[in-house]
Image (tube, helix red, strand yellow):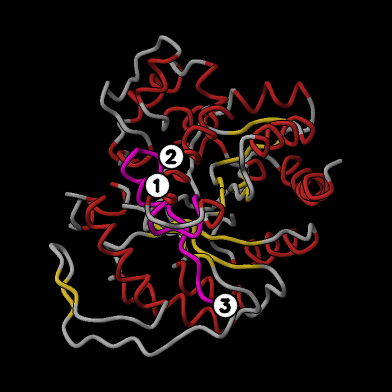
């Protein structure tokens, strides 16, 4: 997953690394503001002058990527049906299908607080809203759009004549973690793209829920590609792993893990017992001193769950363990290049190498 931030040269560099590594896809997130507060970003990065919340629009970025991606698939990871109507999202992805060589990926979820609440957008009944949106998206992609009477969306005499070229119909990948969202993934999704899993066992259990829902809906469970997003911090050696684990950026992503995960290691989440993780955070409302205290309280066990940290050998081993649990498509955002110039140069070399090793099984 690429970081869609200025300058454009940074985007060009990330794309070049993806092509050099013969990756399968390049994805971009869809955010109005970053999950990372400006205070944490400023303390963590060597990229002076960059701002954590300066983010490109995903649709425009995907159009730019489409002209330069070659055989790479392109997609969004993930958007929601609240900031853009599902028919508008469908039109964007169907347009993209005409601009790329392979079917684009529409990663979609139920929405996150930081993209909705500050802008006056609805937060209620997110899963029910997503279910209606998935029905509309599927109808758009199959040329069967008709009148729709839902609780949240209504269509009357709506038309979507734009269709994808043969073999390039956009795929719907659902960003799901909870039981209802996993069930929707099995019913409607072409792929599953969670952000956070605590272990290979956790991944396998959630994937089985997706596949069970697919079977119940009369679909082949193998029709749903098993993916994983999340965040990755690469380190050069064991000493660098220790250093990276102590950075504010790594500890902040641990802070974004749900309170339930903290309870599993016997700790109380500083943002409250009902905190659901990244979907609940409003990054710029976290008071600086309280944030510093919260980061200091992060248990080491949670850091390893909130973000994948390791040397290339360690990352390959962890991804292979997840592959044994069913993982087929790994699309993390690699953030270690933001920590130092040395980490950035290491990432440029390491990402293609990791990709080749995972593809070859070596």
Q: Secondary structure at mark 2?
A: helix
Label 2 crowding class (10 Å Cα cut-off): few <14, some 14-19, many 20+?
A: some
Residue at x 49%, y 62% (from the top left corner): 76
Residue at image point 39% right, 44% down? 182
What's the magenta region? 169-192
The residue at 28%/71% (across/down) is 85
Which residue position holds label 3?
Answer: 168
Taking depth in this image into account, of 16 and 174 the one nearest to the observer is 174
Indicate whether 166 appears above or below 278. Answer: below
Say whether residue 132 is visible.
Answer: yes
Assess whether mark 1 and mark 2 are in contact (beta carbons under 8 angstroms): yes
Rendered-image quadrant of the C terminus: top right
Which of the marked residues, 3 or 1, is nearer the chain's N terminus? 3
Q: Secondary structure at mark 3?
A: loop
Q: CA distance from mark 2 to mark 3?
A: 28 Å
Note whether 277 is above or below 113 in the view shown.
above
Q: Earlier in the sequence, mark 2 or mark 3?
A: 3
* x then y, percent, for residue 190: 49, 60
Q: CA distance from mark 3 to mark 1?
A: 25 Å
Q: Which residue is mark 2?
A: 209
């Amino acid at each position: 997953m690429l970081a869609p931030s200025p300058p454009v040269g940074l985007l060009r560099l990330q794309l070049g690394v993806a092509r050099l590594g013969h990756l399968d896809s390049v994805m971009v997130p869809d955010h109005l503001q970053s999950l990372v507060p400006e205070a944490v970003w400023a303390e963590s990065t060597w990229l002076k002058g960059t701002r954590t919340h300066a983010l490109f629009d995903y649709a425009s970025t995907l159009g730019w990527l489409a002209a330069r991606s070659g055989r790479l698939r392109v997609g969004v990871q993930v958007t929601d049906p609240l900031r853009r109507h599902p028919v508008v999202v469908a039109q964007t992805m169907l347009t993209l299908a005409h601009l790329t060589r392979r079917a684009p990926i529409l990663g979609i979820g139920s929405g996150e607080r930081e993209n909705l609440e500050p802008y006056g957008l609805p937060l209620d009944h997110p899963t029910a809203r997503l279910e209606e949106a998935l029905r509309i998206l599927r109808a758009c992609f199959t040329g069967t759009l008709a009148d729709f009477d839902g609780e949240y969306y209504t269509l009357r005499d709506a038309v979507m004549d734009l269709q994808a070229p043969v073999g390039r119909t956009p795929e719907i990948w659902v960003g799901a973690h909870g039981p209802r969202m996993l069930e929707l993934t099995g019913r409607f999704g072409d792929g599953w793209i969670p952000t956070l899993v605590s272990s290979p066992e956790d991944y396998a259990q959630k994937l089985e829920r997706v596949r069970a829902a697919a079977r119940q809906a009369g679909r082949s469970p193998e029709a749903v590609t098993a993916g994983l997003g999340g965040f990755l911090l690469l380190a050069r050696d064991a000493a660098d792993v220790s250093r990276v684990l102590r950075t504010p950026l790594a500890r902040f992503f641990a802070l974004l893990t749900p309170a339930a995960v903290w309870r599993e290691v016997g700790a109380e989440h500083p943002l409250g017992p009902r905190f659901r993780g990244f979907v609940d955070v409003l990054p710029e409302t976290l008071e600086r001193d309280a944030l510093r205290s919260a980061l200091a309280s992060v248990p080491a066990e949670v850091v390893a769950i909130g973000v994948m940290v390791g040397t290339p050998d360690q990352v390959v081993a962890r991804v292979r363990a997840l592959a044994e649990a069913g993982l087929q498509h790994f699309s993390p955002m690699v953030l270690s290049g933001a920590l130092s110039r040395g980490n950035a140069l290491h990432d440029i070399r390491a990402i293609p190498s990791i990709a080749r090793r995972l593809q070859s099984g070596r």
